[in-house]
Image (spheres, rainbow, N blue to C red):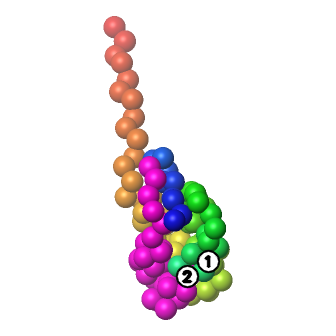
Amino acid sequence: MVQVIKKSKKKEAFKPAKIVRACKRSGCPEPIAKTIASEVSKKLKGRKIVTSTAIKQMVFSMLMKVEKVRKSWMMFEQRKRAKKKPMKAKAKKKKR
């Protein structure tokens, strides 16, 4: 079983369904999303550990081959980044 190391350093089992869901959210048709998930699964066969970033790069490179999906994926990534909480600015101390 392939273990995925997430950015938070947490480990979890590899789930192709997550790839399908992310691809569909980005505007990819379900048959293509399933094909991509299957291809990633094949590439990971025999590996024990992989980072979530490596999986994302594999998916992204496959999606870039599908012209009509490319722009949708980029917009999906931008929306995802925008949802993340921005870092709080440090309060300035008043000088006396």
Going by the numbered disc 2, the residue's amino acid type is Ser
According to the picture, the residue beneath numbered tag 2 turns out to be 38
Q: Is 94 on the left or on the right of 18, as rendered?
A: left
Magenta part of the chain: 10-36
Residue name at image x 51 percent, y 65 percent: 1
Quarter-of-image position of residue 67: bottom right
Quarter-of-image position of residue 95: top left
Depth check, front residue: 35 or 57: 35
Residue name at image x 53 percent, y 64 percent: 2
Quarter-of-image position of residue 94: top left
Residue name at image x 36 percent, y 49 percent: 85
Where does the C terminus fall, quadrant-wise? top left
Q: Secondary structure at mark 2?
A: helix
Depth check, front residue: 39 or 91: 39
Q: Position of residue 83 (x, y in %)?
A: 37, 58
Residue name at image x 48 percent, y 66 percent: 14
The residues tagged by marks 1 and 2 sit, at their Cα atoms, a distance apart of 6 Å
Residue 82 visible in the snapshot: yes
85 is higher (above) or lower (below) than 89: below
Q: Secondary structure at mark 1?
A: helix
Q: Are marks 1 and 2 in contact (CB under 8 Å)?
A: yes
Q: For the residue carrying disc 2, how many other residues have a C-alpha within 10 Å: few (<14), some (14-19), or many (20+)?
A: some
According to the picture, the residue beneath numbered tag 1 turns out to be 42
Q: Position of residue 60 (x, y in %)?
A: 59, 72
Going by the numbered disc 1, the residue's amino acid type is Lys
